[in-house]
Structure formats: C-alpha cells, structure tokens
Image: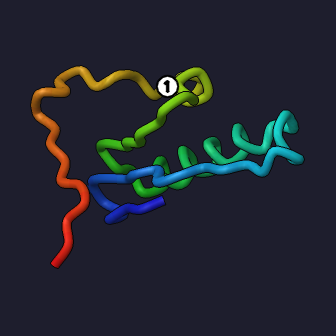
Amino acid sequence: MITDQAVFAYLADIFILEAHRGKGLSKTMVQAFCDLAGQFQVRRTMLATLDAHGLYAQFEFEQLSNPERFMSRNGVTY
C-alpha cells in the first residue's frame, strides 16, 4: 500500500503464487489494506486491475465515477 496516511491510499499490487491460490489469501490481503486505509481515514483508495474486478468489488471498490478527471504518466525516464 502507498499512502500519505491522510487523504489517499493506493493498492499497488497483490500477487499470490499459483500454488497458494484458492485459499482466501487475496481476500485476507485486501481486507488488511481496507482496514489500514480505514484507520488512516483516507478519503480515496484506488487500485488498477486487469482481471480481478470481482475480488475488489467484494470490498466496495467500483469503477471510477469521473474517469475523465484522472490522468497518468507512464514510462517516464529522467
């Protein structure tokens, strides 16, 4: 988790090795993230996922209501 502990939290990645999948580990990890974000009382928690929308929806994550407000910058080298 990346957070300023005040306004924003971002769940960077959850990866479960194939041998350990199906044991509820991802749900435990997402719950821990949500609990920490709740303790910090951040106003927005975000993540990006390619294929785990169903997992995150169980924890009240939803599609962006105003995606036109968000921007990203990828592949930047200095």
Residue drawn at x 82%, y 40% is 21
- Decide: is 22 above or below 12: above
Residue 35, position in %: x, y? 57, 48
Residue drawn at x 18%, y 54% is 73
Structure colour scheme: rainbow
Along the viewing direction, whichever of 6 and 70 lies nearer the viewer: 70
Residue 39, position in %: x, y? 49, 54
- For the C terminus, the image quarter is bottom left
Residue drawn at x 17%, y 24% is 66
- Decide: is 57 above or below 27: above
Residue 77, position in %: x, y? 20, 72
Q: Amino acid at mark 1?
A: Glu
Question: Seen in the image, is 66 located left or right of residue 23?
Answer: left
Residue 6 position by quadrant: bottom left
- Element at label 1: loop
Question: Which residue is situated farthest in the left direction here?
Answer: 69
